[in-house]
Amino acid sequence: MIARTPSLFSRLVAVLAVVLAAGAGVLLVAAWASARLAADEAYDRLLVGAALQIAETIASDGREVSVDPPFSAFETLGLSPRDRIFYKVVDPADGLLTGDADLAVPVERARLAAGPLLLDWEHRGQAVRAVVAGRYVPDAARAGFAAVVVAQTREARRQLARTLTVKASLMVLAMSALALGAVAVAVRAALRPLGAIEGVLAARGPNDLSPLGLAAPREIHLLVGSIDHFMGRLAGHVAVMKRFIADAAHQIRTPLTALAAQLDLLSSETDEGRRREQLARVRERTAELGRLTNQLLNHAMVIHRARSVALSPVDVAGLARRTLIDAVQQAGDRVIDVGYEGADDPVTIPGDGIALREALANLIHNAFKHGAASRLTVRVGRERGRVLLAVEDDGPGIPASEWARVREPFQAATGGGTGSGLGLTIAAEVAAAHGGGLRFEAHAERGFCVILSLPDGEARP
Amino acid sequence: MIRGAAAFVLALLLAGPARAAEVSRFPASETARTTLTIRSVADADAMAPLIRDYQQLYPDVTVVYHEYVTTALFDEVAAACAAGPAGGYAGDLVISSSVDHLIKLANDGCARPHRSIETGRLPDWAAWRDEVFGFTTEPAVIAYRPDLVPREDLPHSRVELVDLLRRKPEAYAGRIGSYDITVSGIGYLFAVYDARAAATYGRLVEAFGRANLRVRCCTGELIADLEAGRIAIGYNLLGSYVYGAMRRGARLGLVVPRDYTLVLSRAALVPVTARAVGDAFAFLDYLLSERGQRVAREQAFFFDRTGPLPPGVDGPPSLSAAGIFRPITVGPVLLAVQDRAKRARFLAEWRQSIGPEAQKGSRRAEEP
């Protein structure tokens, strides 16, 4: 069962939606700020206009300053239809000419010459926008600036800012929704090749391991390539497997046929001496068949373990010594000098102890069986970051021309006599499963050497 | 069961000359649930049909109607507003023909806002801030005695009036009446709008000054003078009151000027200090409703915005006829009318034109 993670589509769309939402949020805040500015600017003009219209009517007859606030000023202010209006007019000596005495907006006469001053103020508990406009009265008892103060509540400004913000927001939201829709469509389109791969795989027969042969965009070209590569390897493995099974069947059938023939002979033999001879041959064939079966099982086990067992620290030196001791009896009645060369200290590498032991046992067995005339040496050593397990004998060895072939199953060296031909295959498989390799060396003086070269865990960074 | 028609009138004068107010009680026909107190500058006679019809719809409300003069009402509502909802009380509904006073009160935050289907139907010029609502349509008219003014003399516009005074100064000297705008709020309002509306204002006031204008405090006195024959022509009178007098049998004529028509919309507001707020708004909605407007047109104020003029009135086909309709807008422009510098200047100019010899009636500050 494949663990189910959130779909690519929803992940992509969710990320883009978050980005779009954040962008929309920033835009909305900006829209609100600019709408407030725009509303203030629009209504400030009316406010200033009204103040100037009132200021225009300030006059002096030399003794008294008078003012006559025109209707038009109030009509201008009335253009913001709901806002309350507060105003006052003061003469240069700060005497109230008309308006609301309690309007406390400060009048800074020094700055009035530069033009009307706008400011935010609070009047009777309400936020108001106020303007102070001046008019210079030269012929008053005390010459100076008379000032007009006009303040207006902010309802129309708020209303306008709100309207503008809502309009801008609708546009921003519409654009965001549109973008999100486009994103959804684009993501769906972009993910379509994955669906195509799925379709092709699902439509395929169980034995079809040919490459997909799909055109794919750059981003998933690697994926399609990997699938094709995997298919290729699988096809290779299946082919090897088929051949192995065919060979194994053949290998088993031959001794079985021979055994059946021996048994036939045995059942019709009456002579006691020949009968014993044939019985010995039957036993031999049976043992051979047993060995073959064992090796087939071992091979299957090694391949299985290579796929399924995690590597753990293994002391290959100890393992080599124990394997050698177990194998010594195979020498039978031949006189062979069996030896071990290598460190007494543990040599530990990450590995599968059972598989390694099987590989080494097979190599030792081969040496006893086909090589070793008088000497068999197992050597454990290190060489450039690798641990070497070598089995050396003084036998004839394998001709260099056959080194490649003998690793294949059931390809025992010619003239090898009896033997299943799986020993080297198992050793090579185990070495490969450990990330190492199997190689042969032939020295004139030392003899023939089969070497398992395994990566040294300690040497790795 | 006591019908609304059985309302009785308590004519009692409250203490203090400025606080003079007549109180009319309209008891609820059923068990009274609440009492709605209306403080108003409008004839109780004019308002009574509206109040009684309202009580048909709300039979469990007792209405107490206080009749005020404008400045007294303004002072009282402003004082109550300044005292705050805890201490002050100035009735549940305030009605005034001096719309500028109500605008000032609303501008000072003394009114409660109200929105309903009825208020939504008002034209923009007849309401402000959902707080001040104009509910009548009352033109400023020229009233005359048909037997004292020959048909060919009858002025249909201000220019014709000026012209008449120039042509026959001796016939009409001392026979023209209008408001004393220094005491009459409505007179001042009409005069200010006359001055705004046309350049004829200066000539008109000048002509009035030469013709020895008789000024009175209020519409009632002007109508009484007309009926008694002390004056022949009254200028800028409230059309609704004149027409009411005609319906009661007074021998009067009424001209709606054809050059332009000033139209006042008597307005109402509910003060922040009101107690029976819901009933006040219900009454307001009634006044603005089609039913209330129909009763007002037929029994109280006789004119309306769009319909034809009432029978027997000389004037344009309707008040809102193209070009001549000059409503006194219920809005912040009226703050200019309220401006004291402007008022002082305007009154000084008026006094100068009309002259100190203007024949004044009683100075009793009785408003229309």
Image: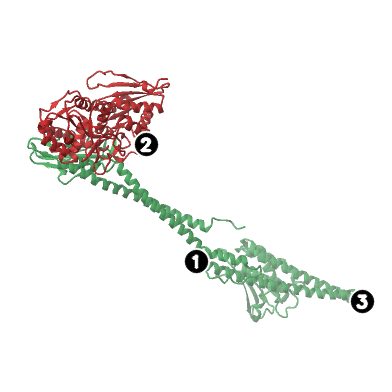
Residue position for label 2: B118
Give the amino acid type for the residue marked by disc 3 in the picture. Asp
Whole-Å distance between the Cαs marked 1 and 3? 80 Å
Label 3 CA crowd tier, 10 Å (few <14, some 14–19, many 20+): few
Q: Are marks 1 and 3 in contact (CB under 8 Å)?
A: no
- The kind of residue tagged 2 is Glu
B205 over A213 or under it: above or below:
above
Chain painted in green in the figure:
A
| Mark 1 chain | A
For the residue marked with disc 1, what is the amino acid? Glu
Secondary structure, mark 2, is helix
Query: Which of pointers 1 and 3 lies earlier in the amino acid sequence?
Result: 1
Q: Is residue A81 above or below residue B29?
A: below
Check the rendered structure and report the hue given to chain B.
Answer: red
Q: Residue drawn at (43%, 57%), measured in percent from left and top?
A: A179
Q: For the residues carrying marks 2 and 1, which lies nearer the camera in this image?
A: 2
Q: Which mark is residue A271?
A: 3
Give the class, few, some or many, for how many residues have Cα within 10 Å of label 1's Cα (few <14, many ≥20): few
